[in-house]
Amino acid sequence: MTTSCEAIQSRLVEHLGEVERLADGERRHVEQCPQCCEAAAAERALARIFARALPPADPELEARVLAAIGPARRRRRVLALLPVAASLFVALLGAVLLGGLPGGSLLALLPMWSSQGWVSLAATMSDWGTAIGTAVGAAGNLVAPGMVVVAALLGLLGVTVVVAAVRRWRRVSPWSGGR
Amino acid sequence: MSFDQASDEQLVRLAVDGDEDAYGLVVRRYQRRLTAFLAQLVGDLEIARELSQETFVRAWSALERFNPSYRFSTWLFRIGHNLAIDHLRRRRLTTVSLQRTDQEGEEVEIVVEDDTKDPLGHFENRELAVSLKRAIEDLRPEYRELVLLRHFAGLSYQEIADLKDMPLGTVKNKLFRAHTVLRNALATFL
């Protein structure tokens, strides 16, 4: 067997003896070389034997798999809630550490908003904006600008984590598009 | 585009979003090849079917961790291969001798014949089935695994190279040599 024969027979093994899948030059060689021609026929016969060696399909396997992934899917939904819960906890903790939640005072303002309408609401939001602006200005005076940038980046990272966690959770939640 | 024309990666994406029908198609697409591959590894068709089921369930549970830059087939077969190895390790620990002593005090091996468990039990030509089984068993282990991945798992050379973390040229070379051995062993059937 020449080097060329060995290379071509290796290609025949790769293509299960199908001569038509070889390059033109290789195909011409096989047509003229009895050894390679015989090797091609043997490879085709071997491929047929292997094709018959595959067991018949199990018609119930798919149903069994789909039945088994139900509990796994429910487990995944519960596990997916953990990052959401953890990130919400961190956010709440942050709010508490920054001076407490304004929930109580906002609720107390609700009757006033309902009687005085959107003007009151806008005024309240404006007050909040002023307060936040003042706080940021004060922080800028007290803390080095570099620290403010780091704190802002951390805050942004926190928000990104919360958004990512919520998106992941929504994907596997029972009321999302998937079943 | 219908499901049938969808690539593995497209089906996997749908399955990650909770589409069980898409995953059902993945199961149909791979079940015969996966079962055939596992049956050759563990030598028992029934156990291979159980391992196939386990492989598909585990793959589904880990779909979100699947890296789409790799081929789904190699990932799935790697999970199956690991499960088969675990099974063989466990079986080795619990294996009991199939030998007993007959009335004359001689050791007799108990032969368990069960075609439903034989990975090649469906072969009509029993002589060919026995020869094929023996030819595969007689291959060097490094060749045998590549032959199983190629002809039972139906993986391409590149997929085998990825799965085995082996250069493509080595895969080609080893399969060429393995085929030379197989063709000699099965010459009467070719």
Image (cartoon, rainbow, N blue to C red):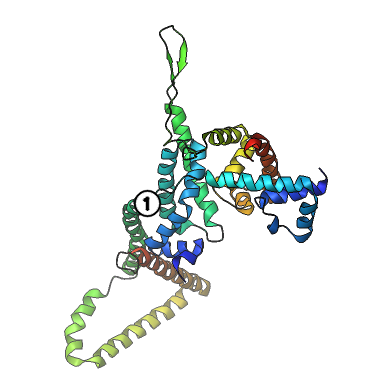
Q: Taking B94 as reference, is A125 above or below it? A: below
Q: Amino acid at mark 1?
A: Val
Horizontally, residue B180 falls left or right of residue B31, namely right
Q: Position of residue A163 (x, y in %)?
A: 40, 70
Which residue has dot 1 on it? Answer: A65
Residue B2 coordinates in the image, percent (x, y) = 45, 69
Q: Residue at x 38, y 53 (%)?
A: A62
- Note whether residue A146 is visible: yes
Q: Residue at x 81, y 42 (%)?
A: A1
Chain ID at mark 1: A
Q: Is residue B85 visible?
A: no
Q: Which quadrant of the view contains residue A26?
A: bottom right
- Residue drawn 42% across the image and 54% down it: B60
Q: Is residue A48 left or right of residue A99?
A: right
Front residue (pair B97, A55): A55
Q: Residue at x 59, y 41 (%)?
A: B145
